[in-house]
Image (cartoon, rainbow, N blue to C red):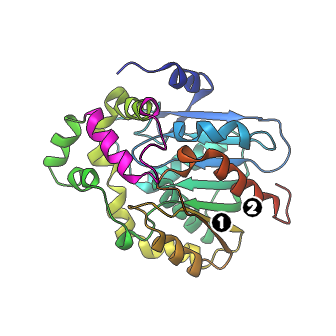
Amino acid sequence: MQLSAPVEAWRSRGRSVRALGMNVFVASHNDQAPGTPLVLLHGFPTSSYDFRHVFDSFGKQRRVVTLDLPGFGFSDKPPGFSYSLFEQADVVELVLGELGVTRAHLLAHDMGTSVTTELLARRAAHLLHFEVASVTLMNGSVHIALSHLTPSQKLLRIPRLGALFARLARFSTFRLQMRRILGRKDAVSDDELRDLFALMRLDDGHLRLPRTIGYVDERRRFGRRWIGALETLDVPSLILWGCRDPVAVVAIAEKLARETPTARFVRMEELGHYPQLEDPARVVHEVEAFLGSLASPA
């Protein structure tokens, strides 16, 4: 699919950084700002483009960094890579090291929340290569047993059938699934959904979906490791949730808020699975209010 002008404009704002032998797309704004940068981690099956409506607003007061995890967006999508959450976390560490980020506020959505909990598990073991100033988790199925996977996600996880379904990916199916998980079906335009789909298919990214969705099984296998990191978390945290999400249901957020000692829970009652696309101004407001309330410099 041909990439639209907005997608090309987003690509022009970033550059490639090498990590684990791959080219990783990274966008960074207001690099000379004092204080602690905000790092944005996207979810499945989309990319850093999810944050384009909030990127500049966050960048008014601080440095803001985002990246396409391997297998997504403008980053490399090698067929032989495992796409494990552990390797995705490695990539985040390597990219931040290359950018000179030694301390960060983390904001994660969807699959990015699991990458973040792996980073927090490393932090708890004194193995993380940067300091975490705060954590914001937004609409991710960290408690996978409580989630309601979409039909597409279920199909992608079936051996052989998943590969066939991925190969036959069509915008009409993608649009139907995306509209189902939004708070309002018309919250995101068809043009924007078409951009997300084009980025998903870029460089055969759609063929990697049966591999990249392996993170669902990892959430089950390593859940204790990752929830344990939240249960002992000692930095400020925000659970920011679109409550009309039919996949990462609000019960997940409620459980995260109960088990994370430092958690502040903010419900966004009218929003669904993609708050940063559905109401970017609300997301910016809530995150800036949270960061502004911290005792340490933002």
Vertical placement of residue 191 versus 237, above or below: above
Answer with left or right where residue 235 lies relative to residue 158. Answer: right
Q: Give me the residue at 27% from left, 35% from top.
A: 172
Question: What crowding class fits label 1: few (fewer than 14 Cα within 10 Å), some (14-19), or many (20 or more)?
Answer: many
Query: What's the distance in space between the residues labelled 2 and 1, CA to CA?
Result: 7 Å
Residue 175 lies left or right of residue 158; in this view the side is right
Residue 71 placed where, x, y %?
40, 39
Which region shows up in magenta? Answer: 170-192
Q: Mark 2 highlights which residue? A: 290
When asked about the image quadrant of residue 100, the answer is: top right
Question: Label 1 is placed on what type of residue?
Answer: Leu
Q: Picture quarter containing residue 206?
A: top left
Q: Residue at x 59, y 21 (%)?
A: 12
- Magenta region's main secondary structure? helix
**In the depicted view, which residue is nearer to us: 282 or 234?**
282
Query: Where does the image place residue 141, in percent across and percent down from the top left?
Result: 43, 64
- The quarter of the rendered structure image containing the N terminus is top left
Image disc number at residue 238: 1
What residue is drawn where x is 15% and y is 40%? 164
Q: Secondary structure at mark 2?
A: helix
Q: Secondary structure at mark 1?
A: strand
Q: What residue type is disc 2 on?
A: Phe
Mark 2 in CB contact with mark 1 (< 8 angstroms): yes
